[in-house]
Image (tube, rainbow, N blue to C red):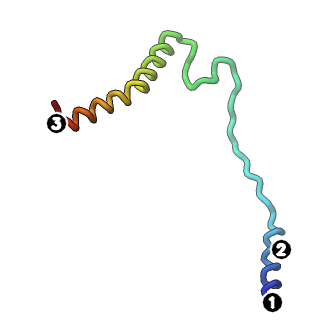
Amino acid sequence: MSMLLRSAPLRAARALPKVNQVRNVHFENVVDHTLPTNVTNKPWLAAKMIVFSVVGFGTPFYAARWQIQKSSGGA
């Protein structure tokens, strides 16, 4: 009896139509538009890269200094 009960839902599940998922995303592959910033203004790009690098590299050192000062009682 259990064999009959198991096979009917399996056949019903196989008969269901499969739905294809489609992603509607469009990327333009154009020269100088592959970065999320304007690369034609070189000084502004250099300033943004320097700020990004300094903040990204300096944050762990600032956090460590803050934790050390916090643990020493603000000395």
Mark 3 or mark 2: name the one nearer the start of the chain.
Answer: 2
**Which residue is rendered at x = 77% and y = 53% of the image?**
20
Q: Quadrant of residue 54?
A: top left
Residue 70 picture location, percent across and down: 22, 36
Mark 2 or mark 1: name the one nearer the start of the chain.
Answer: 1
Crowding at dot 3, Cα within 10 Å, few <14 / some 14-19 / many 20+, comes out as few
Image quadrant where one finds the C terminus: top left
Residue at mark 3: 73
Q: Which mark is residue 1?
A: 1
Mark 1 or mark 3: name the one nearer the start of the chain.
Answer: 1
**Which residue is rendered at x = 45% and y = 15% of the image?**
47
* Above or below, comparing residue 23 to residue 14 in the picture: above
Residue at mark 2: 11
- Tell me the element at label 1: loop
Residue 66 picture location, percent across and down: 27, 32
For this view, does 71 lie left or right of residue 14? left
Q: Quadrant of residue 19?
A: bottom right
Residue 26 picture location, percent across and down: 69, 35
